[in-house]
Image (spheres, coloured by chain):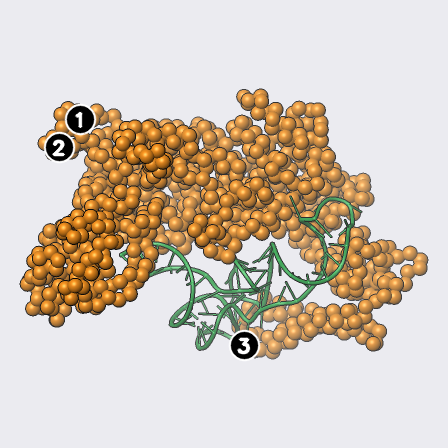
Amino acid sequence: MTDPTRSADSIHTHDSIGSGGSEDATGPDNGAGPPSEAALPTAYDPAAVEAPIYERWVERGYFEADDTSDKPPFCIVIPPPNVTGSLHLGHAFEHTLIDALMRRRRMQGYEALWMPGMDHAGIATQNVVERELAKEGISRHDLGREAFVEKVWEWKERSGGMILGQMRRLGDGVAWSRERFTMDDGLSRAVQTIFKRLYDDELIYRAERIINWCVRCHTALSDIEVEHSDDEGTLTSIRYGDEVIVATTRPETMLGDTAVAVNPDDERYQHLIGTEVELPLTGRKIPIIADAHVDPEFGSGMVKVTPAHDPNDFEIGRRHNLPNMTVMDEQGAITTHGPFQGLDRFEARPAIVDALREQGRIVEERRHMRPVGHCSRCKTVVEPRLSLQWWVRVGPLAEAAGDAVRDERVAIHPKSMESRWFGWVDDMHDWCISRQLWWGHRIPVWYGPDGEVVCVGPDDEPPSGEGWTQDEDVLDTWFSSALWPFSTLGWPDDTDALAKFYPNQVLVTGYDILFFWVARMMMFGLYANAGNGPERAIPFSTIALHGMVRDQHGKKMSKSFGNAVDPLEWMDTYGSDALRFTLARGANPGVDVPIGEDWVQASRNFCNKLWNATRFALMSGAKVGELPGNEQSDRLTSLSMPDRWILSRLHTTLAEVDAYYEDYQFAKACDALYHFAWDEFCDWYVELAKTPLNTGGDAAERTRLVLGHVLDRLLRMLHPVTPFVTEVLWTTLTGAESVVVAPWPAAETARTDAAAESGVVELQRLVTEIRRFRSDQGLKPGQRVAARLDGVTGVLAGHEAEIRSLTKLNIPDDGFMSTASVTVGDVTVELDLSGAVDVEAERKRLTKDLGVERKALEQSERKLGNEQFLAKAPETEVEKVRARKIAAESEIARLEAQLERLAPR
RNA sequence: GGGCGCAUAGCUCAGGGGUAGAGCGCCGGUCUUACAAACCGGAGGUCGUUGGUUCGAAACCAACUGCGCCCA
């Protein structure tokens, strides 16, 4: 079942961290006998364990899924990374969240499937391969379409998908056997199938429109592939005729003007409407028309109309039957008018302005901020261009996508993102899906010699014979990505995988591609799977949105800014778990995540803390076994107050973590775990446990069970976010096979114990006060001094040994001389400081405490003296203030007495 | 220009009608037998500004200022 070489390899490595040189080739996770502290070195070394652990998980098939099991499904499809891409922090973040959800559900007994794969990234990939060819002086046109596409496939085999190996480093639990690619046969078939259906339903059409043209990539772009920025430009006012002055930021397009427009209600120009004016430089006569779209406040209130080079002008042109005059070619060069012909658009602009200036036609030039579109792939300024393209009529599809959220078949997390969703789907423009590329799914439409147009389905024979040609264009990459939640499961075939895992349970992605990708999946998913009925047509029932990863000052990461970070470097230095924990701990729903190296280091420290806590527990003989119940009263076997406290805290934390996970509150779940593990378990319980462990006998035995119980649950709970370190520790602790397939721990409400919790709070308060006193008195933390404890009664009764252990106070011998004392509640501690009492420090501390209490007293008295407060505030609140007042009074009395007792200066 | 969001400790962020929390950083002290990647103690905030609602506002409302994002 496994490759013996690899298996030996992984065991070898495991031995080096694990079984203390044992000859037993099975390793501790295969039942190599009782765990031993010799198993663990004194510090966690992620580099030594991560890779072999991951390989073992994959070999054992933990991440594979069964289409026919009876377990409830839990399926997430990976937001497909580009085949050209490599792992950046954004991926690492998203994958951490998905993996955490998947691992938890797997432990909870779901049939868990995380579908891996990549998209073919039409423009990006074609660019990469063209650049490679250019080094050899070859263009794609030299090769021809077929040979070029062949080259792209070769490139993909050779260099594509670097990210897949990097995902292993992160620990992504994906079902590798199911990996898909948008260009593979099955997914191509899905693309053709849905194209044909949409075409037949008249939801796909071909039309001449203004599109966003990238003059560098030589293709159309959809609206969402264009990024707008406010750039500084010049607003130039040009005199076309005596009374005709137009303002424009793009004077070079004037060669293609076919009208001048004014607002129909603009009093100033009524007499001009219907007349003509001569277009400068061309001598062409163009009409002056009235159109409500014109803003009378802008410039002179008259605008030039260039229907072939501006989307708004195109609409005006349509309304007025104006001719569309294209004056630029696909490279963005001017195609008409002698002196300007062949000039690039940015050269033509000053040339034309100069020519107009010579004629005295430039009335004004002024700085002007205006939005400029840039190609999201190459940042080139986009050129609006009139051309014949294929479109998806999104109206009914987008409405259905909106309805699915409106009637709560699909939930968006966090809910506040819904407004973004509706804002988009309720006002969506038709989607331009054709791209002038060779790498992609070719549009399955054939044109006949007599103008026939035939759309071909996957099982149809394309028309053949003289004069038939296939459309040259390919489809937008997002067209195939939109099918991802079901095409990857085998659609359009009726597969078991589809039946089991569609709809997917969750989609995890960034809010920035809610519209790019999610909206498209919703539209196509609902359309393609409508036959399932409304409840099962949706692509996923929950959309969990995360934010963007930013640097430690909240700045966007970018290569040009120089603040981009390679996640692999951090994984090398601190381990994958450290990176994952940092990212998960920063993941507040829909909110951006700043990350800095310091924080990754802190997470590494946390992993090391867990490591050492487990190491200590193992050294102390911790074991996982049956615990006494909380109610058990047998003095020897019953749990101590600290035991009951940590168990209460553990199970409370577990319940909180569950609730946070269900609400996609990764940050809070991680925080709760961090706080519990470090501040409660390590800092208090482990320290408290040392007393009974040293005592031995039943007390030690009980403590070993509690340590084992808590660590077992804690490690299982942490596994989804820190899979590697928990795997090592948990298998060593339990001797079981793997925490990946361990059950998710259940929160036991019976372990909740308010009495134990308040008892330990009191103990902590006492210990902290004594430590503070020691610190104020200049005692070294480890310095033991003799002290007498009085009044260790009530909930603290029987815990004097723990208190002494935590405060380094020895039992006094015969020669004991009390030279200082501190009182906390009912407890008085008398210490022998051998005369070296720092009275001033003590006075200072008492005075400070006194100030705090006096302030509290004053505040509560003020409130209680307010009749409105007494009359209107809830009784519980009034009670609280009364209690605070009483507490303050007694504290003040105590502190004043203590101050008085201090020797006078 | 339209819409949305955010302003809380030096930094990054939680919180949320009963006058503040975390991580990191900072200061002082410790190699105390799991851990110096650690331990112990400590200092730091009138919760952007101005009004309003309320017995009570950092929290709710309004305006303003600043910042960010999306869309034109």
- According to the image, label 2 marks what residue? A452
- Report how far apart the C-alphas of labels 1 and 3 lie in the structure: 88 Å
Q: Position of residue A587 (x, y in %)?
A: 50, 50
Sequence-wise, which precedes: disc 1 or disc 3? 1
Mark 2 touches mark 3? (CB < 8 Å): no
Q: Compare residues A873 and B41 and report the one nearer the observer.
A: B41
- According to the image, label 3 marks what residue? A868
Q: Quadrant of residue B68?
A: bottom left
Dot in front, 1 or 3: 1
- According to the image, label 1 marks what residue? A463
Q: Amino acid at mark 1?
A: Pro
User: Tag 3, which secondary structure?
Assistant: helix
Q: Residue at x 29, y 40 (%)?
A: A476
Chain letter corresponding to the colour green: B
Q: Amino acid at mark 2?
A: Glu
Q: Position of residue A9 (x, y in %)?
A: 60, 26
- Report how far apart the C-alphas of labels 2 and 3 lie in the structure: 86 Å
Chain ID of residue with mark 3? A
Q: Residue at x 60, y 50 (%)?
A: A602
Q: Amino acid at mark 3?
A: Gln
